[in-house]
Amino acid sequence: MTKKYFGTDGIRGRVGDAPITADFLLKLGWATGRVFAEEGHGFVLVGKDTRISGYMFESALEAGLTAAGVDTRLLGPMPTPGIAYLTRTLRASAGIVISASHNPYYDNGVKFFSVQGTKLPDEIEKKIEHYIDSSMTTVESSKLGKAKRLVDAAGRYIEFCKASVPSGLDFKGLRIVIDCAHGATYHIAPHVFSEVGAEVVTIGAEPDGLNINDECGSTRPEKLAETVLEYRADLGIAFDGDGDRVIMVDHKGEIVDGDELIYIIAKSRLKSGQLSGPVVGTLMTNLGMEHGLKKLGIDLMRAKVGDRYVMEMLTINNGILGGENSGHIICLDRTTTGDGIIAALQVMAEMQSSGKNLYELKSGMQKYPQVLVNVKTSKKVDPDKDESIQKAVKSIEKKLGDTGRVLLRASGTEPLIRVMVEGQSEGLVKEYANYLAGDVKKAIGA
């Protein structure tokens, strides 16, 4: 089902460039209001991260929803998974998130949650797009929507996060460093982790509208690693700008990525008898995680890159755990979407119950070296259908055997073919990746 505006995770782009403009967001709010007004009277939640353009887009969405006759509850800065939770528990018609996640401040976007706290179905997105391309009207004045702020939103979500781990579990004695990326978790995460008993050192919690994700957070965890070593902390936790991703750092200052965190949670759930279905990763999930899970008797399934596809595969296969190496981790036995705070709490719970530190917990899986080479192309090429490319791929796969893998995929946003080779030997992986990239260039005449 082809969509004009919606991508795999809402609508995103540079502020001021279509469609991320005030007039488009006004129309989007109105179109969303029209669709949900048809479903019956209700209200829509609107939350945002801390980037400066959020004020403008919040006002535009509010005006559009009001014109369509739909009530609005404004949450202010709130992590994306917090908006999903509140949409579900408050029985809102929908939740709207104004955020560009891990992108810099000059980008922004909009994504939606259904009343179940999950992504909107394709058919609803198509209906919204239909109204976006229609003439905007305003309901009769007595039927205009009303807007008000929900003052206890943060407190509700904090309690929900704390309830995702057993109340009897004692986190006293754990010293942790939290990097909030100057984003939406800045007023949430420090409370959650201190209220479960940990000693908390906070960085990246002074948003000014321009510093979100700037040299900090889950995409740049180097400062977190330095701070963990400086304070001799037990671990560090880095979120992205909207709080749906998490990367951790162990007491030695080593970065622990999403694949390793998923492995730790999977092993914990298996031990407690709570794991069901396969673990779902993506095409980019490290082969070392697949082998580590296999040793535990846990199947790994690979979805296309993107949390929407991970969620679809989990649902179809009755799984409860999945995610991406970027730190977007979905624990469906605790919540309905990727949640950085809740994922971090599950790892900390396993640390306390097992008596092992994060370095020891991650050692059960061995990450394989992964080399990615981008090959520029002036024309659209499907590497799966090019015989010479496939011949080169099979040659490398034969050499790697079951100790490595090859992945070629055309970028959906740039004129590139991404060549990825993964294996046990870093030297061989680099050699094979460059060799294969050369074959791809020859095949496409680059």
Image: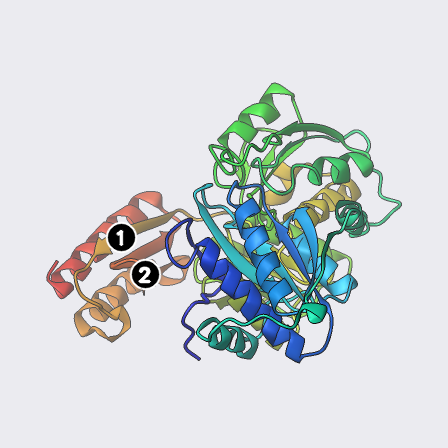
Residue under pointer 2: 411
The residue sitting at 22% across, 68% down in the picture is: 380
> Between marks 1 and 2, how big is the CA–CA gap?
9 Å
- The answer to whether 5 appears left or right of 228 in the picture is left
Q: Quadrant of residue 348?
A: top right
Considering the image in quadrants, where does the C terminus appear?
bottom left
Q: Mark 2 and mark 1 in contact (Cβ < 8 Å)?
A: yes
SS category of the residue bearing label 1: strand
Residue 300 showing in the rendered view:
no
Which residue occupies the extreme top position in the image? 230
Frontmost residue, 144 versus 153: 144
Of labels 1 and 2, earlier in sequence is 1
Amino acid type indicated by mark 1: Asn
Where residue 36 appears, as percent x and y from the top left, is 64, 74
Above or below residue 366? Residue 287 is: below
The residue sitting at 60% across, 75% down in the picture is: 35
Frontmost residue, 143 versus 383: 143
Residue 6 showing in the rendered view:
yes
Residue under pointer 1: 374
